Amino acid sequence: MKKIIEELIELTKVERDAQISTMVDEIKRLSGEKREKKGRAVLGLRGKIVGEELGFKLVRYGRRRTIDTEISVGDEVLISRGEPLKSDLRGVVAEKGRRYLVVALESVPEWALRDVRIDLYASDLTYRRWIENLRNLTEKGKRALKFAFGLEEPSEQKCVDFTPFDSSLNKAQLRAVGCAISADDFFLIHGPFGTGKTRTIAEVVRQLVKKDEKVLVIAESNTAVDNLVELLSDINIVRLGHPSRVEKKLKDRTLASLVFKHSGYRIIEEMKREIEKIERRMEKLTKPTPQMRRGLSDEEIMKLARANRGARGISAEKMSSMAEWIEDRKALDQLYDRVRKEEERIVKEVIEESDVVLSTNSSSFLLEDVFDVAVIDEASQATIPSVLIPINRAKRFVLAGDHRQLPPTVIKAEKLSKTLFEILIEKFPEKSQLLDVQYRMNEKLMEFPSREFYGGKIRAHESCAGIVLSQIASRGPENRKFRKILGKEPLVFIDTSFCSNRWEGKLADSPSRFNRLEAEIVAEIVSELLRMGLKKEWVGVITPYDDQVDLLRQKVDVEVSSVDGFQGREKEVIIISLVRSNRTGEIGFLDDLRRLNVSLTRARRKLIIIGDSSTLSTNRSYRKLIEFVKENGIYVPALNQFDCDSKP
């Protein structure tokens, strides 16, 4: 066990160093303008303090030009005057608009309001928590590792009957809940695309609360935590985490908000007012810096002041002022200590009085309580060091996720991409339940991913099986060439292999790829969809490559993002630009079929895939996908349809 833990610590250090090194290298390598173009910095901002929330100053950073950035609400950022690596002013994005970002800061130095640059920042705080938790694993955390590494066998699975709060749950969801609430050690809920995983988790939590069990509810992302907060808002819950990472409508359930509302917080406010009063007084006194005190200790200064005497060239008046400053500093230290202890008391009381505590994996590190059950969503996206934080704080655990979709993002420590969820479901399939009814997409869009990734076990619920584009479009396509592409069939593949201008490109300073022909095709289709009356928010464009994301964002006015950016989300219409087109048949990291699965399962009514079949078909799954579309959807050669130069 010791060897396993030491290896996890070492892998964490490797990944931490790689993450920070990647960020630092990019900041050094790219100018501010180039980093802004990549969406990871914003330049030329002016700041204005616009308020205070739960102890943080809110600064609105804006400019006249539109801000087009991947920096989002909840992201940690670095504030600088153009040299980010020399700054230590960090904040969290609280709000985002077309021409501004609101950042929550603990303090706001005067320089941080003029000609400011904001950079997306990779903090090492999360990694420090992983390491400290690993070094202090209890038997609860060690037991999870023993299961994973074959050192201990779990108990036989029981599944109880119960009366559900949610009467709409299907058979598989009900079995998942019954098994999860009766497991002696752990249970796994396997929730593929659109199968109601979050609703199932909410029912698990309600049933546990009904049994008077203390529950810790966890997800890897703040968005997933907020979704659960919303579903569980009618029971006694508290949401941990930075207030700026929580949706506005849910902030009254945060720990900070509940602490502020606590009856005992009035005493803290009185002490804080006294602190401000003392700090204002100290500004008028002489601070005993080494230069001013000239070797005198605090005790010597106090003694000379009481005798109304000066010494070593310091006047009696200055001596008295320094003595007052020292007395005030002592009073401040005592007040700060009292505030800290009182806040800790209230926090403990709020958490103890709640039935459910919700948090991200990282934030749960701050908890000292022992819970009966940890229920962990997005477990297939969390590394073992990450997921061990909540597991270390509970007697048993429930993991929910889908190991057929994207794993955790790692740069260097590849072993960390193998999750506890994936290991346990492979070792102990009897301790899991597959949710097998999806409520998201047309059954024709569902069929290929169900066959290819889930053994054909997923079926469409009647509420979504027949949904099509024409039900939400106010008119049909105007241009004749779009009648097949945007007609009644939900699944389309546009094949660029017949075009001589289909080839991918690569920028000199980038490892990514782009494809101009595919970008032009996407732009034409998006334009036609909007002419058909679709709302912009109904349409999404997915592409695996960052440089193609950048190119597409210049051409279309709908959401464009990477595969990772669309995980866990959906749109009425999805257009996929696969990018890769070359003479050697290389498809790069498209070869990770979990990316293909995520891409194919985001659309509800219409999925349009654009790619070069001659390159993609070097991979068996892509070849099968193209054949499936030919038999069950609309296959369109790009030749004569778009601005495609025919092969010579």
Image: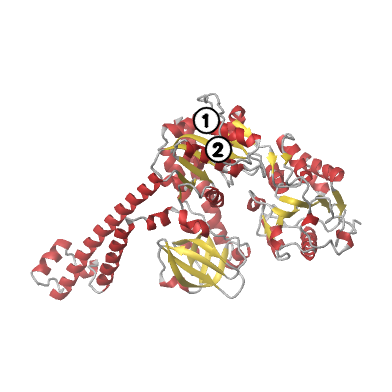
Q: Quadrant of the C terminus?
A: bottom right
Q: Which residue is mark 2?
A: 399
Indicate the position of residue 265 as horizontal and vertical percent values: 33, 57
Mark drawn on residue 502: none
Residue drawn where x is 52% and y is 30% of the image: 182
Please state if 410 lies on the left or on the right of 442 as rendered: left
Which secondary structure lies at badge 1? loop
Q: Are marks 2 and 1 in contact (CB under 8 Å)?
A: no
Amino acid carrying label 1: it is: Ser
Amino acid carrying label 2: it is: Leu
Please state if 421 lies on the left or on the right of 404 as rendered: left
- Label 1 crowding class (10 Å Cα cut-off): few <14, some 14-19, many 20+? some
Residue drawn where x is 25% and y is 70% of the image: 282
The residue lying toward the viewer, choosing from 2 and 360, is 360
Which secondary structure lies at badge 2? strand
Mark drawn on residue 182: 1
Q: CA distance from mark 2 to mark 1?
A: 14 Å
Indicate the position of residue 324 as horizontal and vertical percent values: 18, 68
Asked if residue 152 is positioned above or below residue 300 in the image, the reply reads: above
The residue lying toward the viewer, choosing from 178 and 255, is 178
Indicate the position of residue 559 as horizontal and vertical percent values: 68, 60
- Label 2 crowding class (10 Å Cα cut-off): few <14, some 14-19, many 20+? many
